[in-house]
Image (cartoon, rainbow, N blue to C red):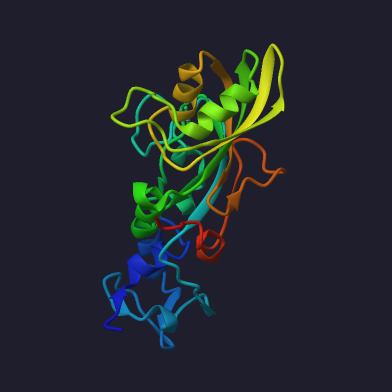
Amino acid sequence: MAGLRLDKILSKSGFGSRKDVKKLILGGRVSVNGKAVTDSSFKANPEDIFVDGNKISYREFIYVLMNKPQGVISSTEKGRTKTVIDLLDDDLKSYSPFPVGRLDIDTEGLLLITNDGPLAHNLLAPKKHVDKTYYAKIKGVVTDIDVQKFNEGLDIGEDKPTLPATLKILESGETSEIEVTICEGKFHQVKRMFHAVGKEVVFLKRIKMGNLTLPPDLETGDYIEISIDDIQNAQKED
Ligand code: URA
């Protein structure tokens, strides 16, 4: 390995921002192959780097599984509205993560956040048809006819009808409870599918994406770090 800048490696290994890392290096706490290095631009192999005598564990990518709360947006852009990135601790923020796809501001549930561009691309690529399952409360009585219509595909105003979706009725009544699995990711898709059968989504929560399941004990607004192995095999080709 030709080596990477010391400050870059350390800031990607949980030692804070580039500024924090610079201080650490200037403080003489970092050594490479047993020799103290005080130059932040020094190029090194992550395997050879020690901080306070402890070997660092370098990682390039982070994978965060969040239970997104309502009221925050799935964006990296700083604005007036709080983003899912704002909910992460500073160490994770230093990896420049972004959400894999979007959940609406009023949708809760499973959201993957990473800095692994190729992985995100794979999970979002339309032809990969990654399954996404949502739990929802619906205003109105959801019937077996709706189940059939979801399975046949619905006209939601796009060029083509939606691909078959699996609708499971958990409870049917004035407010119904359902689970729906879709394999596309069109804007407001679940809400628009229910709109197409004359019903309204009043609560929406994603509970599954590919082979990732929202842990039932993960509170809204909380998150856990997961590994790439937890995510792999989430995709299936056409
Ligand atoms: N479908 C929606 O309508 N909204 C979401 O946030 C996700 C899927």
**Residue at screen point 44% across, 29% down:** 189
Q: Position of residue 140 (x, y in %)?
A: 62, 13
The image quadrant of residue 170 is top right
Residue 181 seen by the camera? yes
Where on the picture, by quarter, is residue 31? bottom left
From where the camera sits, is residue 110 visible? Answer: no
- Numbered circles on residues, count: 0
Q: Nearer the viewer, residue 53 or 28?
A: 53
Residue 205 in picture, x, y percent from top left: 58, 32
The one nearer the camera, 118 or 178, is 178
Q: Residue at x 41, y 58 (%)?
A: 237
Q: Image point 45% across, 68% down: which residue?
A: 59
Residue 79 is left or right of residue 167, and the answer is: left
Q: Which quarter of the picture shows residue 222?
A: top right
Relative image position of residue 17 (x, y in whole percent):
39, 55
Q: Vertically, is 108 above or below 31?
A: above
Vertically, is 65 above or below 151?
A: below
- Percent position (x, y) of residue 3? 29, 79
Q: Residue at x 40, y 62 (%)?
A: 11
- Asked if residue 179 lies left or right of residue 117, the reply is right
Q: Is residue 156 above or below residue 179?
A: above
Instruction: Between residue 205 and residue 158, name the one nearer to us.
Output: 158
167 left or right, relative to 116: right
The quarter of the rendered structure image containing the N terminus is bottom left
Q: Where does the C terminus fall, quadrant-wise? A: bottom left
